[in-house]
Amino acid sequence: MFYNIDLRQATVADLPEIQIVFVETIRQVANSDYNPAQIEAWAAGVRNQKRWEDAIDDQYFLVATAEDAIVGFGSLDEGGYLDFLYVHKDYQRKGIAHTLYEQLEQEAISKNCVQITTNASKTARLFFLAQGFEVVKENSNQIRGVEVVNYRMQKVL
């Protein structure tokens, strides 16, 4: 089933719904690439309320909506760092991530960024490779005492 997706700037009022999408996506979509301890350490990032509010205030932060619900979100900072790109667990493989990414890339181009960088999960790595990114290095992160691997990736614009 395909949905009519609308993109708009996120507001702080969207934060509770964005955070639900964040946690549910990690728990349901990334569980084939990460173990339960890694999933919970990663999902615990939802508790850093100031980081979320700052991202919405300071970044180009979009939400994708369908059927009056937030089904995805993505953000880009001024330097071309793609901070967030998540799609609701029930809306995977419907082109939502691609739609969000295209808009974020256009924003980077309009800001004269020469590249986009991100730290992609094991789960998202293939998506970013399909968008023309390359892996720069594998990162071993300690989150709440748990090792979580992701990949520093970049795309030259």
Image (cartoon, rainbow, N blue to C red):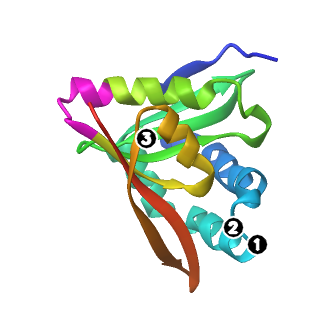
Give the answer, above or below, for where 45 lies relative to 8.
below
Q: Which residue appears at 19% of the width and 35% of the height?
A: 114
Q: Which residue appears at 39% of the width and 45% of the height?
A: 134
Q: Is residue 110 left or right of residue 147?
A: left
Q: Position of residue 154 (x, y in %)?
A: 34, 45
What residue does disc 1 label? 36
- Residue 109 sits inside the magenta stretch: yes
| Res. 75 mark | 3
- Residue 41 sits inside the magenta stretch: no
| Res. 39 mark | 2
Looking at the image, is mark 1 or mark 3 nearer the viewer?
1
Q: Is residue 94 left or right of residue 56?
A: right
Q: Position of residue 109 (x, y in %)?
A: 25, 26
| Mark 3 burial class by Cα count in 10 Å: few <14, some 14-19, many 20+ | many
Q: Amino acid at mark 2?
A: Ile
Q: Amino acid at mark 3?
A: Ser
Extreme residue in the top direction? 4
Q: Earlier in the sequence, mark 2 or mark 3?
A: 2
